[in-house]
Image (tube, rainbow, N blue to C red):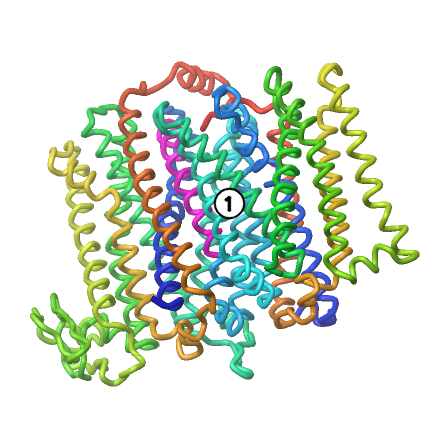
Amino acid sequence: MDAFLLSRLQFALNISFHILFPTITMAMGWFLFYFKLRSNISDHPVWMRIYRFWVRVFALSFALGVVSGVTMSFQFGTNWPGFMEKVGNVAGPLLGYEVLTAFFLEATFLGIMLFGIRKVPNWLHTAATLIVALGTTASAFWILALNSWMQTPQGFELVDGVVYAKDWSAIIFNPSFPYRFVHMMLASGLTASFLIAGLSAYRMLKGDDKIAPKLALKTATYTAAVLIPLQIFAGDMHGLNTLEHQPQKVAAMEGLWETTEGAPLLLFAIPDEESRENHFEIPIPKGASLILTHEMDGEIKGLNEFEGEHPPVAPVFFGFRVMVGMGMLMLAVSWVGSAYLLRNKTFPLWLKRTFAGMAFSGWVATLAGWYVTEIGRQPYLVSGVLKTQDAVTQLPPANVVFSFTLYAVIYAVLLVAYMGTLMLMCRRAVEIEEISTEEREMAKAAKMSPANT
Amino acid sequence: MLFENLSTETLGDIYIGLLGLAILIYAVLDGYDLGVGVLLPPREEKFRDDMIASIGPYWDANETWLVLGVGLLLFAFPEAHSDVLQALYIPATLMLIGLILRGVSFDFRAKVVQVQKRKWDLTFKYGSLLTTLAQGYMLGIYVTGLRTDLWAQGFALLAAFGVTAAYAFIGSCWLILKAENNLQAKAYYWARRGLGVLAGGIIAVSIANLTLHERVQELWFSAPWGYLLMGIPIACFALLVLCGVLLKKLPDAGGKGEWLPFFIALLVFVLCFAAFGISYYPYVIPGELTVMDALSDANSLRFLLVGVVIVVPCILVYTAMVYKIFAGKSEKLSYY
């Protein structure tokens, strides 16, 4: 294997592992802020109990996100020196703003959020929770601005093959950025919702009949039920935007080889790049045209229009179906769950099991979606500007084999340890009393003191 | 655009200054928490709990300075970033593995069953050790101008031990400040031992350093600069001697001046760093690549500088605020 393929595999491994954790923390920051606010308003100690449980999940996820993120900042230079050489004048400042405005904010205030409650006034602890949530969101803002610019670059000029920034607001607010940002934030919201709902359901399955998991399950199920239709709508808009700017990606998503008027929506197929056709198609006639152009006979460009310049078809095609399928499943489960909750009924056993089983379903959908958009950008690293193979390192392949193997082993161990630890935390929470003596006293004191401090 | 009137030379100086500042702050801040990790005693669980509690609220933010340092190298001097890190690919990978292991152990240890806690503690210790050794080795090779011959390797190994000793020393000074009773007594013991090793390390690295580049040798042995520069090692050793005296006296001083060893360690770090900085300016890779040759597009740097000027002071302020909030002896780590 050559350094090119190895570097791609290594970067794919790193970024896939990394995104799992920000996807959770971005939205969980806001969940924690909500729990903290409820705790401030209601005096009921159960909200603090919920906060405390999830803040530990947050801390663990955050740590994994930080360490896997540090790795990435090295790989830009080690494995993809051509990236910074050619487009560093745009990518550098965007990454720089991420570190300056987001990383420090998150990492510093996390300390107060985790360990500071007895050392700082309550308002400052609430503010720290808010600042951490804002920080994770700001971090997503900058990194998605850069990623979107790589998909739909504008606001620059090319001199001797090197990109120079011309207009920063055009660079940041490039055509695909608003769609990608909304789509990703909603994806994060769904991932965190299903994680919270799933682990709460798991606690209940293990015999936990306290209020905390019930409330958390309720909050998360309602949130998911509201977010999922928004996400389907946002995803559709994002798709239309992609059709406009990256038609070859949409053609791969739809598995459409020839430019067609009234293109079918393929529920299933096996795309074959050798013979440039699909096997075992299950089509819905005119479906793709209707969704993408909002007309029965709208024209959609096929892959053959972009021969040699389009992404590998099968991973994009299947990735898209996995993402959409997972989205539909989320819609069904969260709405059924909400229907039970609205009628004040407890979940039957099968539904608890379904929720517990879907605790990590957000990861599947998020990863599938990112594979669609990132593989869909190939063979380019920056659309129309820089091909992936022109950015790769001259490192000896043996070195990359060494690092790739180490990362793969460690990430596999960490992923198992992470999921195992979350489950263990749930099982342990079952035995812990609902309200500790200390909390009861705090709640009493809060009710008695007129200033409510 | 803002900062339009800044010349490219000034921008180069500003960014190399910022890079230096980020690395210095990183070396001090993550230095003490890496040092605490390296010192973690495998057999005494009580100590381990207290030691980890003493760095709990800080390590995430400390590590962010590394991201900023590597980031600044990447944005401002992209050529240097890819040259340095491709040459140092294996040690950099090992350092990252070390950072990953220690970073996650910190959070896992608090959440798993008792039997596994010790495993994560050991992962934390050896992850920290791997990180400090790799950083020292990288520093050594970097200073030689990315040479790979035997002499450079020997120098890099020396630097690996030197940096580890320096981190362990500042880590024990941190514990003197944060710990009480038995652990503090242990920290005094570690600091006294670390002090000797550190002093030896500084002498060895300084002498070896003079043999690496003729330019550096000329600078240090020329008048009048040489005399001024000599002040740095002299001050450094005066401080170390003072620290040695303090480490003997302080345990009986009833808690007064416990911040002094850490403060002295901080000054020693600053002095050593200044000596390096003065020796190798205007190079971004010693003897190989100058700041101006590696500098990226001036307009992009001006755009980023706007953020730097606004945000870096804020970062310093809220970092100081966090240190103030958690000032005093560290308490048992409890999540709330």
The chain carrying label 1 is A
Q: Position of residue B22 (x, y in %)?
A: 64, 51
**Magenta residue span:** A47-72
Q: Quadrant of residue B18?
A: bottom right
Q: Position of residue A90 (x, y in %)?
A: 53, 69
Q: Position of residue A208 (x, y in %)?
A: 23, 25
Q: Is residue A359 visible?
A: yes
Q: Identify which residue is drawn at 43% across, 43% down.
A: A62
Q: Identify which residue is drawn at 72% across, 48% down.
A: B273
Answer few, some or many: residues within 10 Å of disc 1's Cα (few below 14, many 20 plus, some between 14 and 19).
many
Is residue B61 within the magenta segment?
A: no
Q: Residue furthest right?
A: B224
**Residue nearest the observer in this picture, B102 or A279:** B102
Q: Main secondary structure of the magenta part?
A: helix
Q: Identify which residue is drawn at 35% across, 42% down.
A: A414
Q: Position of residue A267 (x, y in %)?
A: 12, 66
Q: Taking A385 as reference, is B227 above or below it? A: above
Is residue A68 within the magenta segment?
A: yes
Q: Is residue A46 visible?
A: no
Which amino acid type corresponds to the residue marked 1 in the rendered image? Answer: Glu
Q: Taking A312 as reference, is A197 above or below it? A: above
Q: Which residue is mark 1?
A: A106
